[in-house]
Amino acid sequence: MTSTDLAISCTDVEVSYTIASHRPLIRDLLRGQKPAAQTIDAVRGVTFDVHVGETVGVVGPNGSGKTTLLQATTGLVPLAGGTCLVRSVPTFLGVSAVLRNHMTGRRNIQIGLLAQGLSQDAADDLTDDVIDFTGLGDAIDMRMETYSSGMRARLHFSIATALSPEILLIDEALAVGDRSFREKSAQRLDEHRANSGTVLLVSHNLAEIRRSCSRVIWLEQGLIIQDGPTDEVLAAYEAS
């Protein structure tokens, strides 16, 4: 494949952040003593390419750098080193994604569609379809602050996939909702892939990874342990 077939190209990507290693005491702060700090290397020299139309799973234990890698790919966190090039601005879909708490679910849908480039008329025309997909019923006209995490995830998934984005980054967002909604979500992703959409899917649900992904990247402590065909990588991961 040529470079024109690439949707994502990451080379020697590094992400690090600094945290206080203990809770500062007031007396120490008054004395001008800063709390000790610790640098965390969340992603360490990761290199991989994803081609247009690929659905790639990302697995690894908690703290392995999976979410950080997705956030770096979409530009939500800065790189400490390396480069990450994308064909278009990715849509990041995570259960912790920010929605507007003081607005209703319906208003969040309208704003989300406008943010994806639709005109006001086009957003109005599509709003009812998105509402139907969420399955939230009358709760769609309640303020977001009243929603459970599962309801929020339903809403965000419905907004983010309404227009089949060119690059979709999913962080555990398929693990919520009832069986019916999970099946609808999986079907929508199938339709997205059929339109040559590119997906990076972080999940602890290995059955979903097997169903959706032809390739898997296994991360441990910010490093790629293995990158290859789904069955091959998951067999090694499960045996570790």
Image (cartoon, rainbow, N blue to C red):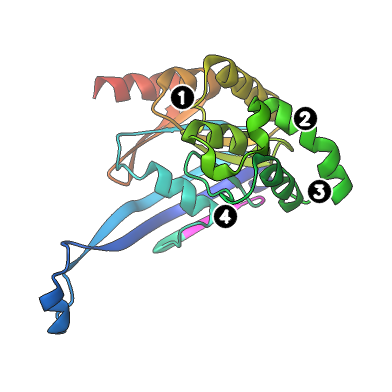
Check disc 1: other Cα within 10 Å, few if <14, some if 14-19, many if 20+.
Answer: some
The Cα atoms of the two marked residues, 4 and 3, are separated by 25 Å
Magenta highlight: main SS = strand
What is the magenta range? 83-88
Q: Which mark is residue 129?
A: 2
Give the residue pinned by disc 3. Answer: 118
Residue 14 appears in view: yes
Q: Nearer the viewer, residue 127 or 3?
A: 127
Q: Tell me which numbered mark, 3 or 2, is placed earlier along the sequence.
A: 3
From the viewer's side, name the closer residue of 51 and 21: 21
Counting residues from the start of the chain, the first of labels 4 and 3 encountered is: 4
Q: State how far apart marks 3 and 1 are (Cα).
A: 37 Å
Give the number of the disc on residue 85.
Answer: 4
Q: Amino acid at mark 2?
A: Asp
Of the two numbered discs 2 and 1 on the same chain, state the one appearing first in sequence.
Answer: 2
Q: Residue at x 12, y 77 (%)?
A: 28
